[in-house]
């Protein structure tokens, strides 16, 4: 009579039986001293461990218990100047909590390249901040289950902690300013993604409340080059708009140059307002009117939330409403 050894249980099987994430099981198994979890949840995990006779691999346990003191900050474009204040404040907040911050590229994570493998398998960071737009929700959730994570700029993602700005309010302020200046035909130059969609919602709602027509969002992209070309095409199509709300300052650079390239004057022919402000906006000619957003505060909040995730994972959304967006009027309106 032959006998065969029972295959060792896997961490994922314990998590499934207990109805929790694999990351939470790992932290309970490894006696994470920073973990705060409900007694009934811990009991459920321990019961599943006992039922499946799960035993962690000794070398894996030693690896997981080792803290790196590093936080990852994954941005869509690490060179975009609109993130400078956010990254600086995030670095300060991390340092105050005895962490260092390293910048990553979301494209590499989304393509499941080397950075993705290092984070998920090597635990090279203790936590990860991810800018919205990384890719499908399952990619975000896979990362979030492997390492404590916070996604910023996103709509709520099941099982993931998200934070964002009051985008609709910022767009409403920009649009209201143009209405008060007498404009009745206002366009919104947007880009792909949930942040732009929320800003478009604020633009549209403000026009509807004022009894004015709104136009479908124009996809001008997030870069200056894309928005420049889109603006030239849009204004060359015979449109009668007299004002544009741009999704962000980098895009507004391209809108600004695109208006000028068509022979129109700012603000005499076409007024322009940017959502978000940056150091270079006052150096344009004419200087750019913008709605200031608390990007620095967002960076500090993101790190604060992430360190909380390392201590105790949770999902749900946090919206940064204070300080509130505010209008900075310059010469483009």
Image: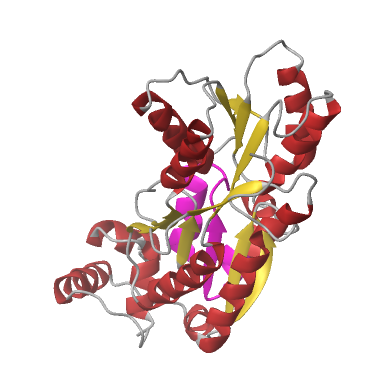
Q: Quadrant of residue 53?
A: bottom left
Q: Quadrant of residue 272?
A: top right
Where residue 158 appears, as percent x and y from the top left, is 35, 49
Q: Quadrant of residue 219?
A: top right
Count of numbered circles in the view: 0
Q: Looking at this rendering, what residue extends furthest in the left direction?
A: 40
Classify residue 142 as left or right of residue 38.
right
Q: Residue, x 47% and y 45% (percent of image)?
A: 138
Where residue 180 appears, as percent x and y from the top left, is 48, 35
Q: Quadrant of the N terminus?
A: bottom left
Classify residue 134 as left or right of residue 149.
right
Foreground residue among 271 and 245:
271
Where residue 33 appears, as percent x and y from the top left, is 35, 88
From this view, report whether residue 119 is shown above or below residue 266: below
Q: Is residue 130 magenta?
A: yes
Foreground residue among 83 and 333:
333
Q: Is residue 314 magenta?
A: no
Classify residue 212 as left or right of residue 233.
left
Q: How is the image coloured?
A: secondary structure
Foreground residue among 36 and 155:
155
Does the rendering let one see residue 80? no
Foreground residue among 222 and 47:
222
Where residue 268 appears, as percent x and y from the top left, is 71, 29
Q: Residue, x 53% and y 88% (percent of image)?
A: 96
Q: Quadrant of the C terminus?
A: top right
Q: Residue, x 42% and y 51% (percent of image)?
A: 166
Please state the extent of the stretch shown in magenta in the rendering: 119-146
Does the rendering let one see residue 93? yes
């Amino acid at each position: 009579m032959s006998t065969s050894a029972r295959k060792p249980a896997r961490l994922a099987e314990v998590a499934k039986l207990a109805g929790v994430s694999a990351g939470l099981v790992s932290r309970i198994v490894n006696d994470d001293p920073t973990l705060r979890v409900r007694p009934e949840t811990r009991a459920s995990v321990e019961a599943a461990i006992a039922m499946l006779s799960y035993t962690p691999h000794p070398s894996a346990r030693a690896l997981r218990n080792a803290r790196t003191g590093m936080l990852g900050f994954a941005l869509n474009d690490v060179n975009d100047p609109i993130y400078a204040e956010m990254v600086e404040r995030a670095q300060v907040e991390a340092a105050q909590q005895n962490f260092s911050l390293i910048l990553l590229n979301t494209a590499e994570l989304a393509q499941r390249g080397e950075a993705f493998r290092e984070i998920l398998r090597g635990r090279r960071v203790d936590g990860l901040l991810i800018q919205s737009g990384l890719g499908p929700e399952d990619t975000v959730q896979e990362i979030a289950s492997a390492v404590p994570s916070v996604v910023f700029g996103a709509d709520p993602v099941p099982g993931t902690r998200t934070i964002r700005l009051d985008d609709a309010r910022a767009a409403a302020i920009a649009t209201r300013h143009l209405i008060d200046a007498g404009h009745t035909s206002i366009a919104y130059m947007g880009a792909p993604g949930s942040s732009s969609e929320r800003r478009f919602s604020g633009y549209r709602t403000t026009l509807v409340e004022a009894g004015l027509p709104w136009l479908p969002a124009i996809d001008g992209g997030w870069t200056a080059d894309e928005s420049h070309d889109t603006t030239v095409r849009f204004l060359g199509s015979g449109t009668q708009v007299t004002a544009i709300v741009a999704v962000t300052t980098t895009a507004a650079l391209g809108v600004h140059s695109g208006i000028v390239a068509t022979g129109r004057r700012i603000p005499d022919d076409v007024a322009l307002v940017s959502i978000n402000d940056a150091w270079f906006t006052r150096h344009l000619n004419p200087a750019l009117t913008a709605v200031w957003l608390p990007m620095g505060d967002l960076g500090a909040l993101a790190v604060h939330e992430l360190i909380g995730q390392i201590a105790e994972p949770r999902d749900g959304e946090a919206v940064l409403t204070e300080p509130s967006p505010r209008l900075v009027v310059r010469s483009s309106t």
